[in-house]
Amino acid sequence: MNKLISILLGLLIFTSFSKLFAQNTLGTITYSEGTYEGYTLFTSMTETYLINNCGEVINQWTSSFNPGNAVYLLEDGSLLRACKTEDTSINFGGTGGRIEKYNWEGVLTWSFNYSAENYRQHHDIYPMPNGNVLMLTVDVLTEETAIQLGRNPEEIIDGEIYNEMIIELEPTGINSANIVWEWSFKDHLIQDFDATKENYGVVSENPQLLDFNFLGNLSGINNWLHVNSIQYNENFDQIVLSSRHLNEIYIIDHSTTTAEASSHLGGNSNKGGDFLYRWGNPQSYNQGTAEDQILFGQHYPHWIDEGLTDQGKLILFNNGFGRSPSYSEIFVIDTPVDENGNYTYEPDSAYGPVDPFHTYTNPSDPVNFFSRILSSAQRLPNGNTLICDGDSGYFFEINENHETVWEYINPSSSNGILTEGDDPHEFPNMVFRAVKYSPDYAAFENINLTPGNPIELDFESVDCSQLSIPDHSVSDVVIYPNPTSNVINISAISTIDKIELFNSLGQRLLVTNSTQQISISKFKPGFYFIKVYASNGSKTFKVIKE
């Protein structure tokens, strides 16, 4: 792909310049003005990478396990990662079995295995504000238990049913944890098949419960729910879940005790563990038909952070799997919720809204944007949206006008690290989720963020740190020493009017009229830029702080 890339560092300071990524097929493909300047985290095979917008590695963590699947960079600089163990007793797409925590230097500081013949961690985890970890798990219901819960015996083709659970862990020691809270789908089922069972009822009148005999478009396989995401809202103390196979999202209360979470009443708001809200496929509770289905194999529903565009709304990647034609979308959903986390529902109807608040599809041809599995979308501080097309290992960032300003193709595949020039379509390079972190994120405080090489081999050398310089730049300015740990001396024949210091993202840190010396001792190690303004122009220098 021959693409002209406008690489901009310091969007508010410098004018843009252009570089040609000659025949780039991997790593950063497009980097244009308006890209949000942050660091993108993703995991691939046994490696987890944090990269800048140029695709250069800021940090890398190595595990002995492939992903299982989620990964998070914590505020203390630690990495929290789900891992896929070799257990095969419970095995479907997204199974894991283990959680690991590494410090910034890559040292394993905590791990916890949760995998046995009848239970297993899978897909997602979530780091709680109090240091605990929410973990998405599956456990096995025997055929006898499933029938007792009202499942039609003809819809149990595997001789068992997988029940989905949320477990909250309190890490202890270096490889153990206490289970401090639980929530389970099996406690919130309804069915209209067997009137002799306790949970028999009218499905359409109980949208707060899950119909145990609604199977979507699937037969009665054991993995009937396939929950692929768990995310948390601290303001409401609520959890949102995503069921790929039932094409629905669910919100539940987390303020309950475990006992209350298994009941239909309880908790601080008398909510119990039943659904507070659901959306995407109203036929699942007999309040719609197949024509009303909106979600198709969706991933990563989560609340947009405060301070960002559309704060408080849900954003998700709607994969579009199972419809014709197949194409993906990004949805922003304005849920009917008040300031206290209470959701509005009108009896004998579907949960609102009828349509998403905002939708993104490929502007030129919707079917050209499709990820059958995996994937994510994230709203960024500048209003842009980072999108991960998971089954292609393709990340791209769009602005508010749906224009693509950044593109990246994962060079890490099941066949090893790819070489620039390889066709990424020939190698599996899938990514579960990609998340971009702001430069002021707490994890980066006092951390050396000097970038290394890109991930791909034989990469095209591109000076992404170059800053634009006016046509008539001064030529008599000299700075020294470089590298330095303390001061920078400036020498020039011309009259110096002003000196500015910027970090690697173009953020101005210092401005002075001094013509001889500036101190950088208080700044963390890394590279910086000094721009010297003189009577006959200006000149920019890259300096390294040791």
Image (spheres, rainbow, N blue to C red):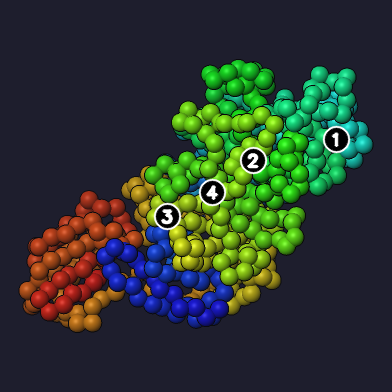
**Towards the viewer: 283 or 150:** 283
Tag 4, which secondary structure?
loop
Amino acid tagged 4: Phe
Pointer 2 residue:
279
Going from the N terminus, do you reach mark 2 or mark 4 first?
2
Tag 1, which secondary structure?
strand
* 517 vs 336: above or below: below
Q: CA distance from mark 2 to mark 4?
A: 13 Å
Instruction: Point out the residue furthest to the right here.
Output: 154
Going from the N terminus, do you reach mark 1 or mark 2 first?
1
**Towards the viewer: 114 or 358:** 358
Q: CA distance from mark 1 to mark 2?
A: 27 Å
Would you call the spot at circle 3 few (<14 residues within 10 Å), some (14-19), or many (20 or more)? some
Q: Which residue is located at x 72 percent, y 27 percent?
A: 206
Going from the N terminus, do you reach mark 1 or mark 3 first?
1
Quick check: can you spot residue 47? no
Pointer 3 residue:
383
**Towards the viewer: 255 or 453:** 255
Pointer 4 residue:
357
Going from the N terminus, do you reach mark 2 or mark 3 first?
2
